[in-house]
Amino acid sequence: MFGGKSVYLDGRLMLYFAAGEEPWRGVLVCTDRVHHAALLVEFPELSPHPVLSKWLYLPESSDRFEPVAERLVTLARRRDTRLGVNPRPKRRRK
């Protein structure tokens, strides 16, 4: 997906690590919009992604990129219910 690395846990897409050009350079937090407010309070470095606004974005250029990214990975490993989305089923080719 977009040339980065997706992280799945228990079949749910949790995080996406992008290493392209902005706005595809950082960590996308795969979450439902209902969880945005709570995550933004806890992580003010996040913002809605400018292209995929349904997900939150931590740009690599953030001064606190590493500690915030580490904390997000920890939340994902703990299966924090605010993180993760069920991927759409793949279409069958005819």
Image: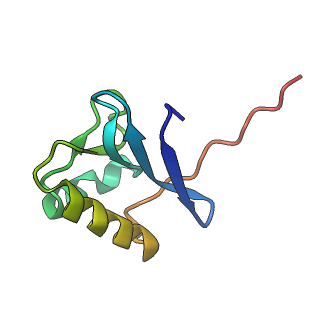
Whether residue 5 is situated above or below residue 2 in the rendered picture: below
Residue in the picture at 17% in, 59% down: 43
Residue 68 visible in the displayed image: yes
Q: Quadrant of residue 42?
A: bottom left
Which residue is painted at 89% across and 22% down in the image?
Answer: 94
Question: Viewed as shown, does residue 14 lie left or right of 38?
Answer: right
Q: Is residue 30 above or below residue 39?
A: above
Where does residue 8 sit, x and y in percent of width and height?
A: 56, 58
Q: Quadrant of residue 78?
A: bottom left
Between residues 49 and 33, which one lies in front from this camera angle? 49
Residue 4 placement (x, y as % from top left): 48, 40
Colouring scheme, one of rainbow, by chain, secondary structure, one colour: rainbow
Q: Is residue 24 left or right of residue 13?
A: left
User: As rendered, which of 40 and 20 lies closer to the eye?
Assistant: 20
Q: Position of residue 10 (x, y in %)?
A: 61, 67
Residue 94's place in the image compared with 41, above or below, is above
How many numbered markers are drawn? 0
Location of residue 77 in the rendering, given as x and y in whole percent from the top left corner: 45, 73
Farthest residue in the bottom direction?
Answer: 78
Is 21 in front, or is 27? 21
Q: Is residue 79 visible?
A: no
**What's the residue at 50%, 33% (across, down)?**
3
Q: Is residue 60 left or right of residue 9?
A: left
Give the residue at the far top of this rendering: 94
Q: Give the left or right position of residue 92, taking residue 53 as reference.
A: right
Which quadrant does the N terminus fall into?
top right
Q: Is residue 30 above or below residue 12?
A: above
Of residues 13 and 32, the one nearer the viewer is 13
Residue under the image location 36 percent in, 71 percent down: 75
